[in-house]
Image: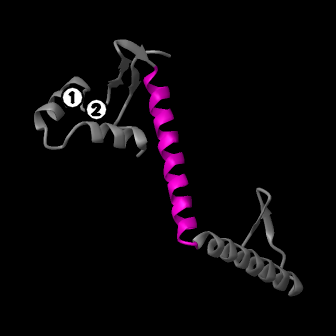
Amino acid sequence: MTGPWRFNYQDSPETFLKWLLLATVPAEDKELFDDLSVRTKNFTEVELGVTINGTPVDAEKLINFLERSLQYRAEDAADRRLENLGLTLLIDKIEEAQADLIREVKDRLEHEGIRLRRFNGEDEW
């Protein structure tokens, strides 16, 4: 759908969209905030529209794309940082040790006659 994206900001969960809207309305600009509050019925009837050179684009798709893109870039930057600090191998070793420990506990429990229940394909403790 091209055009405005209509939603109730008050009933929306804490998401990227909420952060983005707060980031675009400076807290110190009380006049703008008050005007938006009136126009959106206290942010319960928000219409978010995006245009590129006067041509409307799908606001929801754009916001979702921005969120995915920022998430990917943040994860990529974090991975590079861990690798640069030499922590990637350490994390791998910790994960291996955790898996070994879980396997050892399961084996011990089964040896003692205690069986773990399965829940959605996973062992339940």
What is the magenta range?
Answer: 58-86
How crowded pointer 1 is (Cα within 10 Å; few <14, some 14-19, many 20+) is rated as some
Pointers 2 and 1 in contact (CB under 8 A)? Answer: yes
- Residue 15, how many percent across, how many down? 43, 44
Whether 19 is drawn above or below 64: the answer is below
Whether 117 is drawn above or below 21: the answer is below
Look at mark 1 in the image and give the residue it sits on. 36
The quadrant in which the C terminus is found is: bottom right
- Residue 14, how many percent across, how many down? 41, 46
| Amino acid at dot 2 | Phe
Of all residues shown, which one is farthest toward the front? Answer: 84
Residue 99 or residue 122, whichever sits in front? 99
Q: Secondary structure at mark 1?
A: helix
Residue 65 horizontal side relative to residue 99, left or right: left
Q: Secondary structure at mark 2?
A: loop
- Residue 66, how many percent across, how many down? 46, 36
Look at mark 2 in the image and give the residue it sits on. 43
Residue at the image position 46 percent from the left and 28 percent from the top: 62
